[in-house]
Image (cartoon, coloured by chain):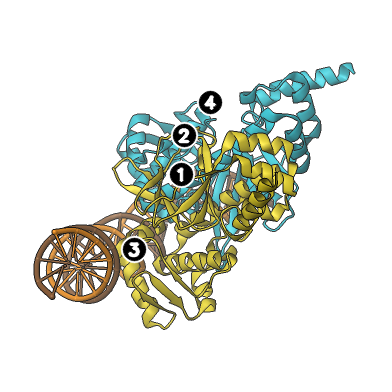
Chain colours: A yellow, B cyan, C orange, D brown
DNA sequence: GTCCTTTCTTGATTTGAATCAATTCCGTCT
DNA sequence: AGACGGAATTGATTCAAATCAAGAAAGGAC
């Protein structure tokens, strides 16, 4: 029994630091509830860069929380192209879009070595019946995902290339900030190609925008590494009044 | 008591026909469960064309199901513009994006005289604890919304004007079809402006595409009224492999 | 009915981003 | 270390859709 206590405290720390942040902490689960949740979570070996966590069409069993690293999700389109639908950073969930169809509508590929918690959804659902605050939190998380997607829509709707990249960089900035990382300096784990795809822009355009931003003194960029010198100006450029373009992680 | 029975049977028919279709029917609620659900639902007087069901920033209390008519949702952007984020037809839900923030991130305006059921979310949540199949259905519905938003993203990402309008018309077609209406002939309740805004296109471009579609014999359009002559071709033009562009209502 | 507003359509022109086409830069492999 | 290959940058050109600019058609008000 004392083993269990040790185990539990270890989990608490892990959740606080990363993956289940949005799922556990904000709703203040009791220790024994937290333990119940922990029991159903599967730890997997880390996914290496380029490996898939799941593929489009795979049967839906679990949702996933990123403990560390990052993952991109993308869907194939008729003409054989891919459309990147999201980037999932540390502490963010993925797989929520599979619940209704019972299969994954997208493929999830690791952008770097990434460790995830796998949460079997059926068991999570059962647990929701027992723990009202968990159920409520699940609704919150799903609603947030809808909101995030709407923001992505807003971005693609009427924004020009400059506004799109600005909003994207600001979004990443906010997400890192809410995890306790620097909002001014970070590494982008995704390629220019992925960014362009996500933003509905050609790679070349993304590259040109980075150059323009740098020349205007807004930021310094070298390959993956970005240092933002003027977050306020970036915010102004992003233009969308709605939550700076993305709030996947502000909960 | 006999009043209640009458009331209940009336509701059953109503739900089957329209608004709570996705929320009730697929999970086969027992009569008494259905009654419990019915008790918490508020019927409102119909919303007239141009009137708002809720406004951006309004506190979140309820989600809404469209019984008949149609509603557009849109968010303001920094530059005073509006971005249409969705159209909600008969049988579809709205307001799900407000759960996480506790306020509505968009305004909902009736496109025609529209009647809705208001479902207080707190009470729905409580009911979910009692009725597992209701809870499960709620997750489904929310997941579907995420999926729908992703599809919208896909549409705006890399598709040209022709593909966007084709996908939009096909989406409307599918949604009408799943309600038992004709997929080949319908009235668009929204203006060209709204369509353009939703699709990230200028009004003039939408108009030109309609003209082009008509000239190619794909469809006949007169003002709001659309008759589609070749659904297969429309499907090909839409181009997105994912569910023909939209499946808000196929559940 | 007529007037007035709004919505829609059509045409001419402009423009921002895509595409095409080279290089250059890095990381990786041997 | 050198060589290869993918990623990123930069420049030149093209093109699809936005914008600008009128009209035409529909819907409402009176």
> Which of the 4 image quadrants contains residue C3?
bottom right
Identify which residue is drawn at 44% across, 47% down. A45
| Callout 2 secondary element | loop
The residue labelled by disc 4 is B181
Determine crowd level at label 4: few under 14, some 14-19, many 20+ residues with C-alpha closer than 10 A.
few
Residue ID for mark 2:
A103
Q: Nearer the viewer, residue D29 or B167?
A: B167
Closer to viewer: mark 2 or mark 4 = 2
For marks 3 and 4, give the CA distance. 45 Å
Label 3 or label 1, whichever lies nearer to me, is 3
Question: What residue sits 45% from the left and 33% below the top?
Answer: A59
Marking on residue B151: 1
Mark 4 belongs to chain = B
Question: Residue A44's spot in the image, x, y percent?
Answer: 48, 45
Residue at the disc numbered 3:
A192
In this orientation, which residue lies closer to the viewer: A61 or B156? A61
**Residue D21: quadrant of the picture:** bottom left
Contact check, label 1 and label 2, Cβ < 8 Å: no
Q: Which chain letter matches label 2?
A: A
> For the point 62% across and 49% down, which residue is it?
A141
């Amino acid at each position: 029994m004392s083993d269990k206590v040790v185990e539990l405290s270890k989990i608490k720390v892990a959740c606080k630091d990363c993956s289940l942040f949005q799922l556990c902490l904000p709703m203040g689960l009791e220790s024994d509830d937290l333990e119940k949740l922990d029991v159903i979570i599967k730890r997997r070996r880390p996914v290496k860069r380029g490996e898939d966590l799941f593929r489009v069409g795979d049967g839906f069993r679990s949702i996933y929380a990123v403990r560390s690293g990052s993952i991109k999700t993308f869907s194939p389109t008729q003409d054989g192209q891919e459309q990147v639908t999201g980037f999932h950073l540390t502490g963010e969930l993925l797989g929520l879009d599979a619940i209704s169809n019972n299969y994954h509508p997208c493929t999830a590929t690791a952008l770097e070595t990434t460790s995830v918690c796998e949460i079997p959804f059926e068991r999570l659902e059962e647990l929701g019946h027992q723990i009202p605050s968990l159920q409520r939190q699940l609704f919150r998380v799903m609603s947030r995902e809808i909101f995030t997607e709407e923001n992505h829509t807003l971005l693609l709707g009427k924004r020009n290339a400059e506004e799109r990249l600005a909003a994207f960089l600001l979004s990443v900035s906010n997400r890192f900030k809410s995890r306790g990382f620097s909002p001014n300096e970070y590494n982008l784990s995704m390629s220019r190609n992925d960014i362009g795809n996500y933003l509905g822009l050609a790679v070349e355009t993304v590259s040109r925008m980075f150059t323009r931003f740098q020349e205007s003194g807004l930021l310094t960029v070298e390959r993956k590494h970005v240092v933002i010198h003027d977050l306020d100006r970036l915010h102004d450029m992003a233009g969308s009044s709605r939550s700076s373009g993305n709030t996947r992680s502000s909960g």
